[in-house]
Image: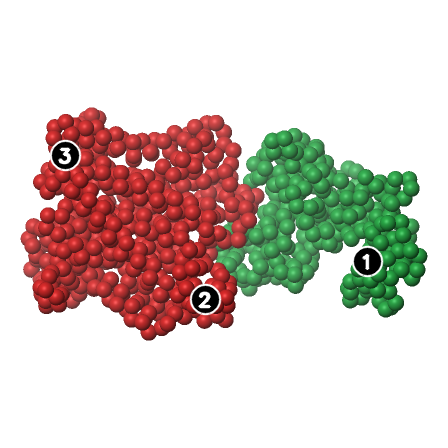
Amino acid sequence: MDDIVPALVVDGVTRRFGEVSAVDTVDLEVHSGELLTLVGPSGCGKSTLLRMVAGLDPVDAGRILLDGRDVTLLPPERRRVGLVFQEHALFGHLRVDQNIAFGVRHLPRSQRRSRVGALLDLVRLDHVARRFPHELSGGEQQRIALARALAPRPAVVLMDEPFASLDELLREDVRRDVTRILADQGTTAVLVTHDRQEALTLGHRVAVMAHGRIVQCDAPETVYERPCSRFVAEFLATTSLLPQPDGTALVARPHDLAVRVGGGGTVVERTYLGATHRYRVMTAEGHEVLADHQPDGTLGVGDDCHIEVVAPHPLHRVPLD
Amino acid sequence: MAVSRRLDRAPGWLAILVVVVVAAAPVAVVAWSLVDPSGGVWADLWATRLPGMITDTVTLLVTVLVGTLLLGTALAWVVTVHRFPGRRLIGWLLVTPLAIPGYVAGFVWLDTLSGPLGARGVRSIWVCAAAMVLTLYPYVYLFARAAFREQSADTLAAARSLGCSAPAAFWRVALPLARPALAAGGALVAMEVLTDVGTVRLFNVSTVADGVLRVWFGTGNRDAASELAVVLIGTAVALIALERGLRGRGRFTQGSATRRVGTQRSTPVATAGVMASCIAVLVVAVAVPVARLVGWAFEARRTGQTVSVAGDLAHHVVNTLRIAGIATVVCVVLGTALAVLVHHRGRVATVFGRVAALGYAVPGPVVAVGAVIALAAVDRRGLLPGGSLLVGSLAGLVYALAVRFFAVSYQGVEAGLLRVPGAAVASSRTLGARPWRVALRVELPMVRGALLAGPALVAIDTVKELPITLLLRPFGVDTLSVWVWQATSESLWVQAAVPSLAMVVVGMVAVGALLYALERGAEVVS
């Protein structure tokens, strides 16, 4: 794999707003055909990074390479980057087919027409070709926005919170469609989201960002099971940290723990989740932890209890600060 | 919407009908003259002057439209996307030419070009068009700026990523998306051109509007004037149809856009260029006219020309403010009341509202001629108590002005009310407020931006209005605009300067109120 040029290389890229670095010497590689999710709390710089890759925001330091070409100083129209936004940003004055054809104006008419047809086919929306964007549902609009971005065969498709404006029922379907389409076309893509579930489910790899830096970038299983820091552990899932004498802490998800009767701890709160009960427990050592446990009706708020690790694997360890 | 939004019904419908009938009467009267043509005069006009009038009208209309669209759109775009020192202030100042009547800019430049600059052939249709462009472009500018401000930066970013350079993104996306706004601004400009009688007279351009006035005052043939006015209605209808057509099927607003078109960093050269262009426009459209007016005003003071035949400056200012004030109050009260009444009554009522608001889409000379004929009919039948007459009364003048301009406040309030969230109305109803109380306490306060903008626009329009004032003013009651009209028709620029300056000052105050209202409006309804 070493001799293959990555589709996107971000090399020491920085963006400053006055004293603050919104993006701080970020390094990132995205491989051809890969879907990388960029996840972090709001204000962590993930959208700014995306905009710099697209050429919409200037780069204060570092380089951006697309298919090996240095595009750092190129304007957006010469980067071959596809963009998909939360609000779809379709052109309201153009029909759906005209929207898709927007970026392939240079092609001869017949090729243009077949390209638009193929993309409408791909997103399964042939029947809306002659409608206007406002006549479509949110999910349809998003698929058209993707088709429009794919039409000029971009080196990479950048998606900024593409599903955030869709309602929850629809979001699931559109997500599945979008990942199918991207995989179908072998498209390289970066998807920015603040939704950790979305990042873990969709990404071939997940880059976790905080305070302008990428703190961990690995396969979803890795970032979830072996987070490199307390922040990553707590950001990606509901987590209880069990402090150890050596200054580290064990990372425990609620399903890694079980509640047992007796032992000096106290049940602080019990929440019904359907399949399980979630207990908030103050341990005898004075730590608050969360544990999911089959509802067997024996424990209630105020009861004496202790926590037992039931995970089938040893718990992962992170530095405590 | 489960909450019933109906006001107490019957009296409201009656009120709507009365307003519609009264407001539409002058236009209906003029249109009616087509049914019973007088023959002789018409044939005569057609054989002699009418073809020329139509040619001049169309030439002027097209030239001014192209000019205002180019200038207004370009200025709105650079002010929206470029960051430069004083951008906010310049953005506001670019609206101020609205306070300068076209005929004032006209005579100032007529004298400046032929006098100090020594140019020849100044009394031409092209210079006339230029004077109009300089005073009318703010209509396009205001609409275009609002449209550009509303556009989503993401949309432009998408266009860039799809291979458009920045200029290409403007031409292929930003401009087409602003098309309805440009059409609306252009429609206002077109109406002003069709209405104008002051500027064209200065430059010896014989338009149809000018012809209506000449026939009226020259031959006293009311039927002929009325028939000629029908040509203006026809043109206006064609323009409205064109404007509707330009809206197309697309959806141009991007209400939910998260990221607005922002200002971009520009190169020093671009910044300097943008600033220089904006300042150049302000110099030509505002600074030179005001400076020359001030100079003339001092000369007039020195030579004792500050009095017209009808009296001194104070007399004219008082008349102007009184007429504009009363007309503005009438327009705002009627416009707001009608908008509130119509708002809750569905489609039929909306159509009635549009009919009542027709006056603004009808050129001034038509309203003037129609109002005189309609009022004279009332007078002839002696319908008013005590034998008082409407023609030549202050009431008659205010009536005609209201017919022409009340649409301005009506449409503002109507558009504002449509943006009031239904939930706000519903929740105040469930809190026990009766419908009229909801209107007064919730809906109208929420659209107060539009409520303020309406009167400001009406005041600007009535102060510089000419054809209606000329035809309907009571004997001995002269306004500033009439004074300027009389002085300029005899090329007495020095004498015209004092009332012109007074008009500009009044206009500037109104423009200030308008800008304040627009800024507040943007904050309130968002």
Q: Is residue A10 visible?
A: no
Q: Amino acid at mark 3?
A: Thr
Pinpoint residue A103: horizontal percent, then vertical percent. Answer: 54, 47
Horizontal side of residue B235 vs B300, given as left or right: right
Judging from the image, what secondary structure is the residue with disc 3 in? loop
Pinpoint residue B507: horizontal percent, then vertical percent. Answer: 28, 42
Residue B109 lies in what quarter of the image? top left
Q: Which mark identifies residue B306?
A: 3
Q: Is residue A288 visible?
A: yes
Residue of label 2? B433
- Count all numbered tags in the image, as a single digit: 3
Judging from the image, what secondary structure is the residue with disc 2 in? loop
Horizontal side of residue A148 vs A258, given as left or right: left
Q: Which mark identifies residue A216?
A: none
Q: Which mark identifies residue A268?
A: 1
- Judge by depth and name the residue closer to the eye, B51 or B219: B219
- Verify CB contact (< 8 Å) between mark 1 and mark 3: no
Q: Of all residues shown, which one is farthest toward the right? A: A263
Q: CA distance from mark 1 to mark 2?
A: 46 Å
- Residue depicted at 73% across the width and 39% down the height: A214
- Judge by depth and name the residue closer to the eye, A13 or B88: B88
Q: Colour of chain A?
A: green
**CA neighbours of label 2 inside 10 A, class few (<14), some (14 to 19), many (20+):** some
- Judge by depth and name the residue closer to the eye, B454 or B43: B454
